[in-house]
Amino acid sequence: MREEIADWVGLNMIRGIGPLLANKLLREFRTPANIFTASRRLLERHGLGVETIRELHGGEVLERAAAEIERAEALGIRLVVLADEEYPPLLREIHDPPLALYIRGNREAVLAQPCLAVVGARRSSSYGVNAARSLARELAGSGMTIVSGLARGVDGAAHRGALEAGGLTVAVVGTGLDSTYPREHASLAEEIVATGALISEFPLGTPPLPQNFPYRNRILSGISFGVLVVEAAEHSGSLITARLATEQGREVFAVPGNITSQTSFGPNYLIKDGAKLVQCGNDVLVELPRRMRERLAGIEWGDDAVTGVPRAQATLESLLLSDSERRIYDLLSADVPAHVDQLLIASGLAASEMMSALLALEMKDRITQLPGKSFLRRL
């Protein structure tokens, strides 16, 4: 088994063979071992160059792969290859899945629950940071795993929001797992590893090369049911992630922004192009496929004996908002307090129904009550 892993890791380390070509070769030769032993003529027929073939046939790469496995084990890093049962199933479906994943932390974090990628600008505004942190906290508290890229700005805020909720978060990075980039996120990375995981497809020692980051974005979207974009400039890597998500058949969500802000171009453009506008976690939860709702609910699907409502759906719906709660929530802002009398008039609800809705929203941690019976949305 160790030799088989070395074949996968070695193939992943060869210059001139990326995931797209590697997967094409695997369809033809079935296993990495067969690729290493294939004839020069057959390999040339598949477009491999002289140097790449020499490296395949030289044997040195397998020695380096064995040393790589030993070093990874010493660092507490688990290698999961494409042939493993524990390889993320959604990621396996994309047309260029990584041959090997380096995982540090809880490798079950990416398998246990539905994942949502939250991405956005590195140079984000306070609005973007607050929105990412708040939405990640809400969704992680509802049971979703938050996936992001450990970058400055929106990524860091998303990871922190998930951690604040006591939920799971996964960071997909563009370097080897023996280093942290950016360096100021070293402590955040350790917090993530405590319950979630750091993931990379890059061999140990890989530096933070600029081309690595847009390349790793296909993993962010690939392991997730959808991608949520929070602030992104016109040529942002986050828009690349959204495009990849569309190509992979994933959902695309976006948080709207100020039309005069450069970092709002991306999400506003995506919304015009058909992405779902997100104001709260509920806007994401309602788009979950039925099977993911069952996993999120954590119980078997079946009808409740009394209500006839599917039990898993009923559990999930308790995380969402009723019509009256939604009506009240939509009347509130995070900046200007609204008095209970204003809400009564604007909502058109009976006083008792409105008070019940306010109490439910407080219990769900969606709003804050201020002195004098005024209310604010929670961020």
Image (cartoon, rainbow, N blue to C red):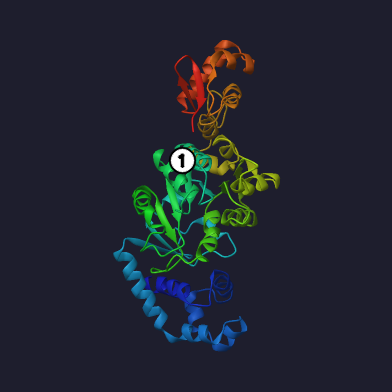
- Is 215 in front, or is 121? 121
Q: Residue furthest top?
A: 351
Q: Residue at x 54, y 63 (%)?
A: 215
Q: Quadrant of residue 25?
A: bottom right
Q: Is residue 346 left or right of residue 366?
A: right
Circle 1 residue: 140
Q: Residue furthest left?
A: 74
Q: Residue furthest front?
A: 260
Disc 1 secondary structure class: helix
As drawn, 213 above or below 308:
below
Q: Residue at x 57, y 65 (%)?
A: 96
As drawn, 313 above or below 72:
above
Q: From the image, which quarter does the N terminus lie in?
A: bottom left
Q: Quadrant of residue 205?
A: bottom left
As drawn, 326 above or below 282:
above
Q: Amino acid at mark 1?
A: Ala
Percent x, y for residue 33?
47, 78
Asked whether the viewer can see residue 139, the reply is: yes
- Is 68 in front, or is 290? 68
Asked whether the viewer can see residue 106, the reply is: no
Q: Is residue 255 left or right of residue 167?
A: right
Percent x, y for residue 143?
46, 40
Percent x, y for residue 22?
54, 73
Q: Residue at x 50, y 22 (%)?
A: 360
Other residues around mark 1 within 10 Å, as few (<14) / some (14–19) / many (≥20)? many
Figure label count:
1
Percent x, y for residue 13?
45, 74
